[in-house]
Amino acid sequence: MNWQLTMTLLWCEKVHSWVPVSVYEDGTVRCGHLTRLERSKKKIGKSAASCSPASCELCISYKQKVFSREGKV
C-alpha cells in the first residue's frame, strides 16, 4: 500500500479527552492535542506537561499497529 499519513482518534487518560494521533510513513508520530496546545499557546497542564509522542503509550501502540499491518515491524 502506498500512503503518507494515517490518523485516528484515541481516548487519552492523561487529558481525559479524545485526541487525534497521526502516524507518517517515515515513522513520525504526532499528537493533535499537543499540537493544538502549542498553536494556541495555552499553558500545558501538569498532566500533559510530560507528554511526548515519542514516549506516549497511545502514540507508540498506534504506530506499532499501523506498521504491523504494513509488515514493517
Image (cartoon, rainbow, N blue to C red):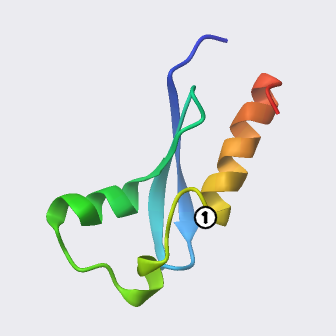
Q: How many marks?
A: 1
Residue drawn 82% across the image and 33% down it: 73
Q: Which residue appears farthest toward the top when viewing the image? A: 2
Residue at (46% x, 85% y) in the render? 47
Vertical arrangement, residue 2 with respect to residue 20, above or below? above
Would you say 70 lies left or right of 10 here? right
- For the residue pair 43 and 32, the one nearer the viewer reads as 43
* Residue at image coords 67%, 54%: 60
Percent x, y of residue 41: 16, 68
Viewer-closest of 24 and 18: 24
Q: Residues within 10 Å of mark 1 (few under 14, many from 20)?
A: some
Residue 19's x, y, as percent?
A: 45, 60
In the displayed structure, would residue 23 be above or below residue 39?
A: above
Q: Is mark 1 on a helix, strand or loop?
A: loop
Position of residue 2 relative to residue 6, above or below, is above
Image position, residue 31 (x, y; %)? 45, 55
Q: Mark 1 points at which residue?
A: 56
Residue type at the position of mark 1: Cys
Question: Can you tell which quarter of the image residue 55 is in?
Answer: bottom right
- Residue in the foreground of this view, choosing between 5 and 26: 26
Where's residue 11, x and y in %? 56, 67
The N terminus is located in which quarter? top right
Q: Determine the residue located farthest toward the bottom in the rendered image.
A: 46
Q: Would residue 59 appear left or right of 17 to someone viewing this image?
A: right
